[in-house]
């Protein structure tokens, strides 16, 4: 049973609100479909994918990976602080996680601007279509996640923090899969 006494089956055993876990599962399915589609394009058009990857910035993608992993750590520390009744510390940890999310978006924006200056858009070819769809959808999740972290920092209960940080960790997980798949695997 969850905190409200509702029985959600196996979802009741997870931290936070079970409805967030349904959202997380649905997002994982959507990103899974993106990843399968990207893998199919890689098999069908390896030259297109290799040419697209050659223009990507591994340092920018790597920096964004470190930023999101660090922000996930800060979000986890926020939950620990709240569990110890350190509400203000919890809010500071969340603020740090959200600030790093903003850094991620700035770097992603710079990367998009660089690609646009090269004339590489969503219509260029199948690589760029999936690149922009996957990374753009992920960036929207980062933006939403920053908002979620702000809300759970304001409404700072352990259930809210567990719910919000579960979403934030899903955002981290997606990037940890997306970065090597799109940027690194040759």
Image: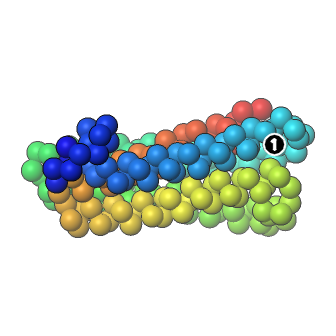
Q: Quadrant of residue 70?
A: top left
Q: Nearer the viewer, residue 84 or 9?
A: 9
Instruction: Tell me: 120 left or right of 105.
Output: right
In the image, is 47 to the left or to the right of 179? right
Query: Residue 40, percent across and down?
Result: 78, 39
**Which residue in the rendered view is the most extreme toward the left?**
85
Secondary structure at badge 1 equals: helix
All told, the count of numbered labels is 1
Residue 154, picture quadrant: bottom left
Please indicate whether residue 75 sits to the left or right of residue 30 in the image.
left
Image point 88% across, 45% down: which residue?
48
Q: Where's residue 114, x and y in %?
A: 73, 62
Quadrant location of the C terminus?
Answer: top right
Q: Residue 11's x, y, as percent?
A: 32, 42
Q: Name the residue beneath numbered marker 1.
A: 41
Tell whether 104 sits left or right of 46: left
Q: Is residue 32 visible?
A: yes
Q: Quadrant of the N terminus?
A: top left
State the residue at coordinates (61%, 42%).
32
Residue count near mark 1 (Cα–Cα under 10 Å), binned few <14, some 14–19, many ≥20: some
Identity of the residue drawn at 31% across and 37% down: 10
Using the image, determine if residue 136 lies above or below residue 82: below
Residue at position x 65%, y 45% in the image: 33
């Amino acid at each position: 049973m969850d905190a409200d006494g509702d029985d959600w089956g196996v979802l009741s055993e997870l931290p936070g609100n079970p409805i967030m876990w349904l959202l997380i599962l649905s997002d994982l399915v959507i990103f899974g479909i993106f990843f399968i589609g990207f893998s199919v394009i890689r098999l069908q058009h390896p030259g297109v994918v290799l040419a697209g990857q050659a223009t990507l910035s591994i340092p920018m993608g790597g920096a964004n990976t470190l930023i999101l992993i660090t922000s996930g750590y800060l979000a986890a520390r926020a939950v620990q602080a709240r569990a110890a009744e350190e509400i203000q510390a919890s809010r500071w940890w969340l603020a740090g996680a959200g600030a790093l999310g903003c850094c991620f978006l700035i770097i992603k924006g710079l990367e998009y601007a660089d690609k646009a200056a090269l004339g590489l858009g969503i219509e260029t070819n199948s690589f760029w279509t999936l690149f922009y769809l996957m990374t753009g959808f992920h960036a929207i999740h980062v933006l939403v996640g920053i908002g979620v972290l702000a809300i759970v920092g304001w409404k700072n209960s352990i259930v809210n923090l567990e719910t919000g940080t579960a979403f934030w960790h899903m955002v981290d997980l997606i990037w940890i899969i997306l970065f090597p798949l799109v940027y690194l695997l040759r």
